[in-house]
Image (cartoon, rainbow, N blue to C red):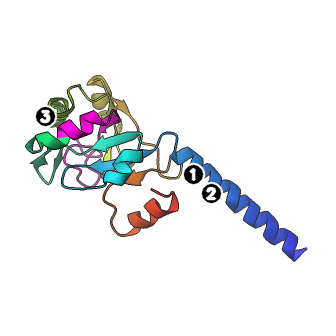
Amino acid sequence: MKIKNIIIVVSIMIIIYSLLITESRNPLIVDDLHPQYSCDELTEKSDVLYITPLLNNDSILNYPQWCAEMKSLNKTFGLHGIIHQYHELLEPIEEEDLKEVMTIFEDCFGYKPRLFRPPYNKISKENKVLVERLGMTVYSKTYLLHPYCHCQPYSWMKILNIIIGC
Ligand SMILES: [Zn+2]
């Protein structure tokens, strides 16, 4: 009886883990991409990459070679926040600031961003309306619903990357 219970629990865990892995590849998302960070292997195998155009006030336009390389990969790119501050999309934001990073994105990739992922998956109703009005689709599914990878994981995020084999 005890062994039977162990088998049931292990089976359920295997099923949950398989679901997590399957969902994470549907598509494989990588967050926090910026030329300051290097995650070439992960970039290569990912499907959708979310860019932080102004990380630490360092514009991706300072790296034209990087922009050219990214474009040549033929991946899907999206916008990942403005300067990627903690919960920045929960606070009221300036439309001009959002437009500025959209322009930076466009100048790098050659097209306007159509996908938007708020840092930490947090966005207020007002900001969501604004982002959508500017022509982007908000994708803010949490890790448990759609596990994703971090280009430059730190502390516990490293574990999240390992769990789904980033
Ligand atoms: Zn992020």
Q: How would you classify the magenta stretch by its main secondary structure?
A: loop
Please identify the quarter of the rendering in which residue 11 is found.
Answer: bottom right
**Quarter occupied by the N terminus:** bottom right
Kindly indicate whether the residue at mark 1 contacts the one at mark 2 (C-beta within 8 angstroms): yes
Circle 3 residues within 10 Å: few <14, some 14–19, many ≥20: some
Is any atom of residue 120 visible in this view? no
Is any atom of residue 142 visible in this view? yes
Residue range corresponding to the magenta coloring: 67-92
**Quarter occupied by the C terminus:** bottom left
Per the image, the residue denoted by label 3 is 100
Question: Hey, what amino acid is under mark 2?
Answer: Tyr
Q: Secondary structure at mark 2?
A: helix
Q: Is residue 24 one of those drawn in magenta? A: no
Question: Hey, what amino acid is under mark 1?
Answer: Ile
Rendered residue at 42%/39% (across/down): 47
Per the image, the residue denoted by label 1 is 21
Q: Secondary structure at mark 1?
A: helix
Per the image, the residue denoted by label 2 is 17
The image shows residue 53, relative to residue 133, as above or below, that is below
Q: Position of residue 58 (x, y in %)?
A: 11, 50
Q: Position of residue 34 (x, y in %)?
A: 22, 49
